[in-house]
Image (cartoon, grey):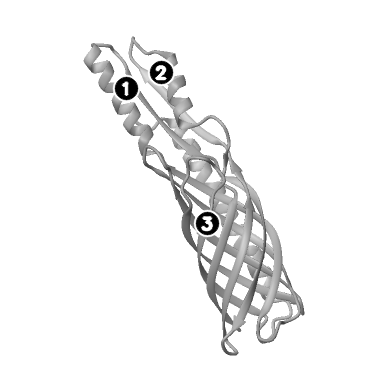
Amino acid sequence: MITNSKKERIIMNTTFRQFVVYMVLLVGLILVPVGVSAADNEVGVSVSYSTVNEEGFDNGFGFGINYTRAIMPNAAVEIGVDRKSFDLEVGGGSVTTMPIRITGLYRLEPMGTIRPWVGGGVGYYLNETDASFIDETINEVNDDCDVSGLDCSYSGSADLKDAFGFHLGAGADYPINDKFALTLGLEYRIVSADPETNFSCSGSDCNPLIEDELTSIAGEGSSDLGGFDLKIGVKYMF
């Protein structure tokens, strides 16, 4: 059962996420009209293989979309949204993170037809946890209450809070004609997310130690979601 406080928290989180997305779109709209000329704009899509620093997580795959605006002959600003998921090694479940990122790019001198670049920026990471193992643990605890004839019913949830992060990277574009180019990049992200747990019990035989144990199982420290992203994609230039 969802309490009023939990409903309010969900509404606040959703509103803040929408605010972040709208602000990123606004920045993009501001950048577009300034000095637009041929090939100043690029829209790209990519797939990625991502490592994760946190122990107990498997590496994962993701995808993304981005818009890049040239602001100087060798400099550009990129706005992008990625989505990647990491499975938990034990217990089942996964963590999905969707960073909304702004990146400054410096384009080096071309190496033949290859256009190398370096860059860095910041991102706001929208995190969501599928903690199915927590639900299974709660069900087991409630089954023990029933078998023991105790008046107790436990409930709760575990998630990761959204977080700000940073990223650095390098890569290269390989134009295949005047409009399209293949892209390859390697980036390192720096981001950690705090846990958001909420466990409670109703009944006359509730044991606070069990609630503490559930919190411990869910994780009490920050999760290091940093790691490497190897990206391959294609972009359209206009």
Is 188 or 127 nearer to us in this picture?
A: 188
**What distance separates the C-alpha of mark 1 from that of mark 3?**
35 Å
Evaluate if marks 1 and 2 touch, with contact meaning CB atoms under 8 Å apart.
yes
Q: Alpha-carbon neighbours of circle 2 within 10 Å: few (<14), some, or many (≥20)? A: some
Q: Which mark is first along the chain, 2 or 1?
A: 1
Mark 3: few/some/many CA within 10 Å (<14, 14-19, 20+): many
What label sits on residue 16 in the rendered view?
Answer: none
Query: Relative to the observer, which residue lies in front, 170 or 127?
Result: 170
Corner quadrant of residue 163 = top right
The disc at residue 50 is: 3
Q: Residue at x 48, y 26 (%)?
A: 216
How many residues crowd mark 1 within 10 Å: few (<14), some (14–19), many (20+)? some
Q: Residue at x 43, y 43 (%)?
A: 88
Q: Is residue 187 above or below residue 195?
A: below
Question: Which picture quadrant has residue 201?
Answer: top left
Q: How many marks?
A: 3
- Which quadrant does the C terminus fall into? bottom right
Q: Identity of the amino acid at label 1? A: Val
* Mark 1 vs mark 2, CA separation in Å: 9 Å
Mark 3 vs mark 2, CA separation in Å = 35 Å
